[in-house]
Image (tube, helix red, strand yellow):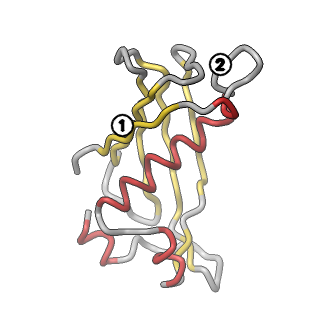
Amino acid sequence: MKPHFLSFRIRYSETDQMGVVYHGNYAQFFELGRTEWLRELGISYKKMEQQGVMLPVVSLTCNFKKSAFYDEVLTIKTSLKKMPTAKIEFNCEITNEKNELICTGNTVLAFIDLKTRKPIRCPEHILKLI
C-alpha cells in the first residue's frame, strides 16, 4: 500500500510560549495522518463505528528529531507497516518545509467490537480495500 501525504500549517494554539510545537500535539498529528490514509481508501472512522467496529490506539511511539515551529507547514507521511489482523499498525514521518525530519512515530490500533468490547479480526471489506 502506498503512503499517504498530508500537509498542514502549525497554528499558534499548537505551540508553547517559545513558538515550538507542544509535544502532546504529535499524537493528534499522527491521528490526522492515519484517518486521512483510511479516508483515501474509502474507509471512515464514523462509518466503521456505525458498523459496530472501534479502532482504539493501543500503542503510540514518537521519536523527536528536530523542533517544529509556529506557522511552519509540516507534512505527515503515513504508511501501513503490515497487513492488519486484529490490529492495524502505521508508521509516520513528519517533515518541515525544508524536508527536514521532525519526528518519526508508530501507532498500533486494535479492531474492537463496539457491543462486546472484545478484539476482532480486521473486517473483510477493509482488507479488500487495502
Which one is earlier in the sequence, the residue at label 2 or at label 1? 2
Whole-angstrom CA distance, mark 2 to mark 1, is 21 Å
- Report which residue position mark 1 lands on: 77
Residue 126 position in % (x across, y down):
33, 71
- Report which residue position mark 2 lands on: 20
Q: Is residue 33 above or below residue 24?
A: below
Question: Residue at horizontal 39%, vertical 15%?
Answer: 100
Q: Secondary structure at mark 2?
A: loop
Q: Is residue 20 above or below residue 49?
A: above
Residue 68's quadrant in the figure? Answer: top right
* Residue type, mark 1 in image: Lys
* Residue type, mark 2 in image: Val
Q: Is residue 120 above or below residue 109?
A: below
Circles 2 and 1 in contact, beta carbons < 8 Å: no
Residue 9 position in % (x across, y down):
49, 32
Question: Residue at horizontal 59%, vertical 47%?
Answer: 59
User: Dot 1, how many residues are within 10 Å of its Cα: few (below 14), some (14-19), or many (20+)?
Assistant: many
Nearest to the observer: residue 17 or residue 35:
17
Question: Residue at horizontal 52%, vertical 49%?
Answer: 31
